[in-house]
Structures are given as structure tokens and as C-alpha cells.
């Protein structure tokens, strides 16, 4: 049996004024951006001054938050039902502009202009794998230092792997500080005992690089590196400061995953990595979980019932709806059981990680109302917000086996009666 | 070779892209199985270092080498004609760079020394398109490789590439433009041109994997529009993945007759039928909403004018049997 992890209490996390940064991470396609937006909205409507920093939102979601352009400036989101002090701002990251701003902040105008015009800098700032992640961190640091918001929710860049977010800044720093770069930047000095060795290696390398990339490109790189050298200390310091910020107690990481093997494998890597880096993990958000009102009816029984009906009917149409409903239910139960198995594998390995789940929605979310409902679900409103739950339901404990495997999702909460009754089908 | 006509006869390099979470790797693998008919040999390539193919086929991590990984779809119902071979290869920029240096300059050991001091990071930073050129270059090389001595027969009858996601595909395939800003002349430029000639020929098709949901459909349409702007690139099919069948006519889903449903459930020997009928009806209604959304999204995809193939959601999870089921679907629908 899988372990029973604690429940991730979203409202406690966002209501706690000590929570200053929430980082949503996870592999691509699991709904990070939407989750970050939903959390931001709920926090704002519960009185926090929130800024959501997003990297690549879907067009309609961006529109719903009033983000029409990538302008690197937090914009106020209209339509937030914030009682009293709460407010919501949102911004889309412009990584090149963020990079440019760092250069401008750390170099005198002449040198900054020289760097900004360098072709090598231009490709580095717009397409080096990791620049986006680095700049997301940088922007986060800036927003935090400005102290204009008391909660910042960050959506991490859509990268191949969830770990890229943690590694990329380090990678960019290492790259700019790397041996090869140092070699290229400093002309080989004569008179040192090891010059010959370096010289041989250097010639070989520049030879290969020139073959590969052409001489002009290499010269651009050397010019850039020499100009950037004076900035580098500041650059590195900022990266380190932001990294420390992520380790601070006011930061909470939320790992978002769909109940799929790949997404949960990434989530597990990420959880382990956060532990190694001593970064504060708040919990796992299991997104797009299929919840079934009739989960007490198992897949085999449902199929058997469908077959009984089909075998017993005289007219083919007689029980058409019932047969379809039972077959659909059996299929959904199979899917849902697989999701539980996959999630169970994660929770067995990481029993202490709090989990919150969000129901799979039949339609996409692209307005504030949708975000609001999603956040409500995330915060523990048990029941599928898109399936009207029968009000009269009493807990049905018919067949313990299926229910037991769901037990970890249904930790009893100090909740109002309405919530408890809508929980019935899974507790 | 099969005598059957497929929608993509003449295509040797199948590039498969899709939004994250749509099952791009699964579909690429199924397509490779489908293409590997009797006597045919297919190479399935992974380019993102995720080892998704190895996991899918339950094999150890793939090296930078072509390894046989599966047997393809057999001849149509003919047991004496088993399927052809599916090989797999994981291309990483570092391996591709070493390959390139060795192939064109005989510089394998120098290349190895370079990778130790961060050469790949450096080279890809200095010319971001470079690793894409090297990776696509390896794929096009495999697609054009001929059996030594024969001079005419290709080693692989088809190559399937599990490519980067839709958001990055235009840039990934538009290799010449990507490197041309930086390398105006020189060997990389010449290499990029050769690669581009294959990518932008009728021998290559770019297929989009998509689920019938708003964001993936929008990204697919954007991706198709982007590729159509690149001269010579052939947009292939749209492969809808994880589709749900309609089951019933819409009105029956939306407003099931509860007493009738309860009566039917009782007839099937189930208890607590009043509540169960209500719960099952709720599930039917939710399914109807999803089917309605699917129909809307399918219509959007139709408007793009590319052939559409549809693969069902496999609720049990993807294993080899499931891959073969999907491969059979792709063949039946003419994709392979």
C-alpha cells in the first residue's frame, strides 16, 4: 500500500505572511503557468499584494490577466475580487531586456553600449540555453528587492526538464567563468614555465573552433569576454544572491505534475534535488487528476453490469444510455486507478511531501473565474468543480479496496459540513 | 517495400513534434513501428537527451549509437511476413559535434579534449543554432546513408525523429538562417546548407502531435503557420492523440433520463441505483462536455487543411502492446 502523505494546505501557505515567494516548477505541459496564476489570484483575493511572474503563458490565459505585451513590467490585473488590501499584478518576462538591464546597471555607458552591440552577446542574451532561466531568477530577485509586493509567484520557464531551472543560472555562470573562456580572453603570456603546454592546447582549440565557427565569430567572443570581464563579479554575485533567496525560509517551492509516469519522475528528481540544495519544498500539486463521482463502482463490476444488460436486452436500444455510462465509467476507473498507482509510486518514495490535487477539467481555463475555481479546488475544496455534486450524498462505504487506495487523498480536514459531504465519494 | 500507398510515400525523414504532454515520443515510436513493415528497416531518433524512447521500449538508456530496439508491424495479417527492424539512436549535441569533427576533419581526439574544457557549451553559446545543425545533420545523414558497396540502396527505409516541442520546432529546423547570422561562410555554413537541402525537400515531412484541447491545438496551428513560412518545408500530418470516443449522441449525454438509468442499473444487479444513476449521469455529462470540446477543436484543426489521424486514449498506460496498437491505427489510417 502506498504511504499516506500529509495534505498540502494551500490556504495556510498563502495566508502566512512569512511566505514571500512561491516557485511553481515541473516538467513541460503539466499546467505550471495556470497553476501559478490561480495561486496568485487566490492569494490576492485573500488579502495579499501579489505579483505573478510568468514566462510563456498561453495567449488566452495572458489575455485574461490583461497581459497583452511582453513588456517586462508588472501590470495590474483587473477583475480581482480583493476585499481590502489584496491586489494582483502580473508580468511576462522579457529575458533579453532583463539581461540588457543588468549590463547597463554594471557597466559605464560606453562599455555597456559596446557589449550590447556585440554579436556574441546578442546570441548569448537571446538564445543560450539557460539564459531564460537565469533571467527569470534575476527578475525574481529584482521584484523581491523592490519590496512592492508581499508575495511573488513565479512560473518557471518551459524547459525540457524541471531541473534546468535550478541548473541553468549556475551553468551560465560557469560558462562565463569557464576555462575555455578564460583562455580565449587572456592572451597567452610569455615567460611562464607552463606556457608551452597552454600554448599547444590553446592552438589546438582555437584551431578547431575557427574551423567550426569561423574566425570572426571567435574574435567577437573574445571582445565580448574582455568587455564583460569587469562586469563578471557583479553578475556572479547577483546569481549567488538570488540562489540564496531561493533557500530562504520565505520561499516555498511547489512541484507541479500530472499523474503521468514521466511528469512524476521529473517531480521526484526535483524533490530530491531541492532537498540536496536545502531549498524549501512546500509540496506537490498533482494536476489533472480524474475524479469520479461513482468511484465506489469498480471497473470490473461496471463492465460486468454493462455486459449483463447487453446480454439481457431484446431491443438493442433498450439500455443504450446505461450501457454507455457503465462502459465509460469502467474506462475512467481504469484511468483513475492507473493515476493512483503512478501517484502512489511517488508518495511511497517521498512520504513526507505534502500533496494537493486538482481535478482534470473538461475545458481549458482562460478567464479569472476559471482560475478562481481551479484555485478553490487546489485549496482543498473536495469535489470536482465541474461536476455538480449531489447534495444529499452520504459517505458510501461499499467496497473497501478501491477506497483504501484513495485514502491518502482524503485526509480529514477541519472543514465546513458542505465540504465534508462533497468529499463523501472518496473518503 | 510494401505495395500499399500511404499518405507519405517518398518521405524518408519523418520529423515528429508536438506540445509537451501530448505524447510526442509515444507517437514517434508508434510511427516507427508502423513504417517498419516486412523487410523494412527504420531508425527512430531522439534528440533531447530524455531517454524517453528507452523508457518506452523498456530498454537500458540509449547510447550515441544505432541499436535495434524492436520489431515493426508485420505484413497485413500474414504470419509468414514478420515486421522489419526498428533501430534507435539518441543524438546529443556533444556526440554530434565529435562525429562532425571526426567526419570532416579527422579530429576525434582533439574533439574529445575540447569537450573536456567545455567546448560544447562554448560552441553552442557562441552559435546557438550550431547544436541544432549538428543534431539535424546527424538525422539527415542517417536518412541519406547508403549501403556500402551498393551505392544505391539506403541503409534505412525511413528515419523518424522525436523532435523538440512545437514551440521550438521552427527554429530547430530553420538551421540555415539560425547559423547564417554568425557563420556567413565557412564549414558550418556549408554543412547547414546541406542539412537544409534535405529538411526542405519532399523527402522530409514534419508531423504535429496534438490532443484535442485548446492550448495544444492553438500551438499546433501556430506551428503549422510558422513552418509554412519556411520555404521548402513540407508540413505533414496532424496526429491527434488520446482522443475520446463519443459513445452516444449528444443529447443522451447531456440529459440522461435518471429513473430509466436507475432501472437499468437495477436490472444489471447493482444496488443503491438512485444515487449511482445520478453519479454516472454526472460522468456522462462531463464526458459530453469533453466530446463537445473535442469536436470544436477538431474543426479548428481541420481548417488547417493537413491530413488528420486520430489515436485513441489508452487508459491502461503505454507498453509495447499499446505501441503496436497505435502503430496499427496509423497504418490503417494511411499515415504509414
Image: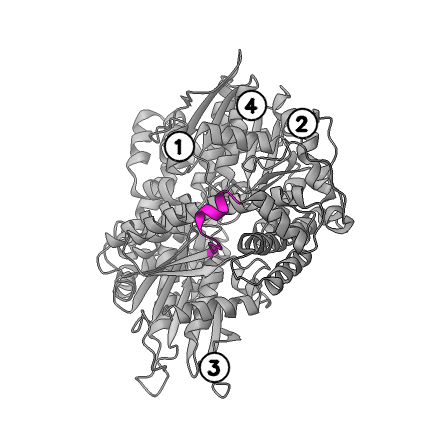
Have a look at marks 4 and 1 and say if they share a chain.
yes
The residue pinned by badge 1 equals A62
Q: Residue at x 41, y 23 (%)?
A: A74
Of badges 2 and 4, nearer the viewer stands: 2
Residue segment shown in magenta: B242-256
Q: In this figure, which residue is indicated by the disc labeled 2? A: A418
The answer to whether the residues at label 2 and label 4 have Cβ atoms under 8 Å apart is: no
- State how far apart marks 1 and 2 are (Cα): 33 Å
Camera sees residue B44: no
Q: For this view, does B262 lie left or right of residue B23? A: right
In front: B88, or B264? B264
Q: Distance of mark 4 from mark 1, alpha carbons?
A: 18 Å
Q: In terms of secondary structure, where does tag 4 sit?
A: helix
Q: Outermost residue, top direction?
A: A84
The nearer-to-camera label among 3 and 1 is 3
The disc, 2 or 4, on the residue closer to the chain's N-terminal end is: 4
Report whether mark 2 lies on the same chain as mark 3.
no
Label 1's element? helix
The reply to whether residue B185 is visible in this rendering is yes
Chain under label 2? A
Percent position of residue B8, x then y: 31, 69
Disc 3 sits on a residue from what chain? Answer: B
Q: Is residue A26 above or below residue B321?
A: above
Q: Which residue is mark 4?
A: A43
Q: Check disc 3 and report the residue beneath it.
A: B77
Out of A292 and A137, give the one closest to the viewer: A292
For marks 3 and 1, give the CA distance: 51 Å
Q: Earlier in the sequence, mark 1 or mark 2?
A: 1
Q: Nearer the viewer, residue A154 or B291?
A: B291
Amino acid at each position: 500500500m502506498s504511504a499516506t502523505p500529509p495534505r498540502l494546505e494551500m490556504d495556510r501557505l498563502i495566508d502566512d505572511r512569512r511566505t514571500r515567494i512561491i516557485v511553481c516548477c515541473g516538467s513541460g505541459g503539466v499546467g505550471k503557468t495556470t497553476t501559478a496564476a490561480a495561486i496568485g489570484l487566490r492569494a490576492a483575493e485573500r488579502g495579499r499584494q501579489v505579483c505573478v511572474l510568468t514566462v510563456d503563458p498561453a495567449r488566452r490565459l495572458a489575455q485574461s490577466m490583461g497581459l497583452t505585451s511582453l513588456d517586462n513590467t508588472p501590470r495590474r490585473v483587473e477583475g480581482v475580487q480583493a476585499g481590502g488590501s489584496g491586489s494582483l499584478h502580473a508580468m511576462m518576462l522579457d529575458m533579453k531586456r532583463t539581461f540588457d538591464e543588468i549590463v547597463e546597471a554594471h557597466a559605464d555607458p560606453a562599455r555597456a553600449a559596446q557589449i550590447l552591440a556585440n554579436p556574441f552577446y546578442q546570441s548569448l542574451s537571446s538564445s543560450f540555453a539557460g539564459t531564460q532561466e537565469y533571467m527569470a531568477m534575476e527578475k525574481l530577485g529584482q521584484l523581491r528587492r523592490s519590496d512592492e509586493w508581499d508575495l511573488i509567484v513565479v512560473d518557471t520557464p518551459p524547459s525540457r526538464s524541471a531541473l534546468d531551472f535550478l541548473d541553468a543560472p549556475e551553468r551560465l555562470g560557469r560558462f562565463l567563468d569557464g576555462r575555455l573562456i578564460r583562455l580565449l580572453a587572456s592572451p597567452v603570456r610569455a615567460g611562464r614555465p607552463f606556457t608551452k603546454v597552454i600554448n599547444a592546447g590553446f592552438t589546438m582549440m582555437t584551431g578547431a573552433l575557427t574551423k567550426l565557427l569561423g574566425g570572426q565569430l571567435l574574435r567577437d567572443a573574445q571582445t565580448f569576454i574582455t568587455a564583460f570581464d569587469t562586469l563578471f563579479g557583479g553578475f556572479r554575485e547577483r546569481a549567488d544572491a538570488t540562489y540564496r533567496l531561493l533557500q530562504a525560509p520565505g520561499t516555498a517551492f511547489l512541484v507541479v505534475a500530472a499523474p503521468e509516469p514521466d511528469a512524476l519522475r521529473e517531480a521526484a528528481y526535483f524533490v530530491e534535488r531541492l532537498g540536496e540544495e536545502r531549498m524549501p519544498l512546500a509540496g506537490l500539486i498533482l494536476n489533472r487528476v480524474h475524479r469520479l463521482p461513482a468511484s465506489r463502482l469498480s471497473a470490473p463490476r461496471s463492465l460486468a453490469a454493462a455486459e449483463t444488460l447487453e446480454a439481457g436486452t431484446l431491443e438493442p436500444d433498450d439500455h443504450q444510455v446505461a450501457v454507455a455510462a457503465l462502459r465509460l465509467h469502467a474506462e475512467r476507473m481504469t484511468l483513475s486507478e492507473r493515476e493512483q498507482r503512478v501517484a502512489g509510486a511517488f508518495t511511497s518514495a517521498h512520504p513526507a511531501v505534502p500533496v494537493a490535487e486538482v481535478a482534470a477539467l473538461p475545458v481549458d481555463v482562460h478567464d479569472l473565474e476559471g482560475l478562481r475555481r481551479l484555485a478553490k479546488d487546489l485549496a482543498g475544496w473536495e469535489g470536482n468543480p465541474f461536476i455538480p455534486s449531489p447534495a444529499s450524498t452520504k459517505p458510501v462505504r461499499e467496497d473497501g479496496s478501491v477506497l483504501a487506495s484513495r485514502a491518502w487523498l482524503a485526509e480529514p480536514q477541519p472543514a465546513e459540513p458542505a465540504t465534508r459531504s462533497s468529499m463523501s465519494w472518496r473518503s | 517495400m510494401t505495395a500499399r500507398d500511404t499518405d507519405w510515400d517518398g518521405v524518408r525523414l519523418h520529423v515528429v513534434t508536438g506540445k509537451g504532454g501530448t505524447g510526442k515520443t509515444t507517437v514517434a515510436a508508434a510511427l516507427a513501428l508502423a513504417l517498419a513493415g516486412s523487410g523494412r528497416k527504420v531508425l527512430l531518433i531522439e534528440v533531447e537527451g530524455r531517454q524517453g524512447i528507452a523508457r518506452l521500449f523498456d530498454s537500458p538508456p540509449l547510447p550515441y549509437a544505432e541499436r535495434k530496439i524492436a520489431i515493426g508491424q508485420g505484413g497485413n495479417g500474414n504470419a509468414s511476413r514478420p515486421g522489419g527492424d526498428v533501430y534507435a539512436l539518441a543524438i546529443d549535441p556533444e556526440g554530434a559535434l565529435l562525429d562532425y569533427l571526426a567526419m570532416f576533419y579527422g579530429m576525434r581526439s582533439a574533439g574529445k579534449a575540447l569537450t573536456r574544457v567545455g567546448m560544447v557549451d562554448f560552441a553552442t553559446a557562441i552559435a546557438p543554432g550550431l547544436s541544432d545543425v549538428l543534431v539535424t545533420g546527424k538525422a539527415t545523414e542517417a536518412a541519406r546513408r547508403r549501403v556500402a558497396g551498393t551505392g544505391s540502396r539506403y541503409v534505412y527505409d525511413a528515419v523518424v525523429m522525436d523532435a523538440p516541442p512545437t514551440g521550438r520546432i521552427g527554429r530547430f529546423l530553420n538551421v540555415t538562417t539560425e547559423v547564417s547570422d554568425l557563420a556567413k561562410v565557412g564549414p558550418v555554413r556549408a554543412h547547414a546548407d546541406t542539412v537544409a537541402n534535405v529538411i526542405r525537400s519532399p523527402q522530409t515531412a514534419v508531423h504535429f502531435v496534438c490532443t484535442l484541447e485548446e492550448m495544444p491545438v492553438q500551438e499546433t496551428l501556430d506551428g503549422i503557420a510558422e513552418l509554412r513560412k519556411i520555404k521548402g518545408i513540407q508540413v505533414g500530418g496532424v496526429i491527434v492523440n488520446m482522443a475520446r470516443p463519443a459513445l452516444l449522441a449528444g443529447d443522451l449525454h447531456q440529459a440522461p433520463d435518471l429513473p430509466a438509468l436507475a432501472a437499468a442499473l437495477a436490472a444489471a444487479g447493482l444496488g443503491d441505483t438512485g444515487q449511482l444513476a445520478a453519479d454516472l449521469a454526472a460522468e456522462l455529462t462531463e464526458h459530453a462536455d469533453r466530446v463537445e470540446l473535442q469536436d470544436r477543436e477538431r474543426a479548428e484543426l481541420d481548417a488547417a487543411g493537413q491530413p488528420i489521424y486520430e489515436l485513441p486514449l489508452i487508459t491502461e498506460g503505454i507498453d509495447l502492446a499499446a505501441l503496436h496498437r497505435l502503430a496499427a491505427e496509423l497504418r490503417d489510417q494511411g499515415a504509414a
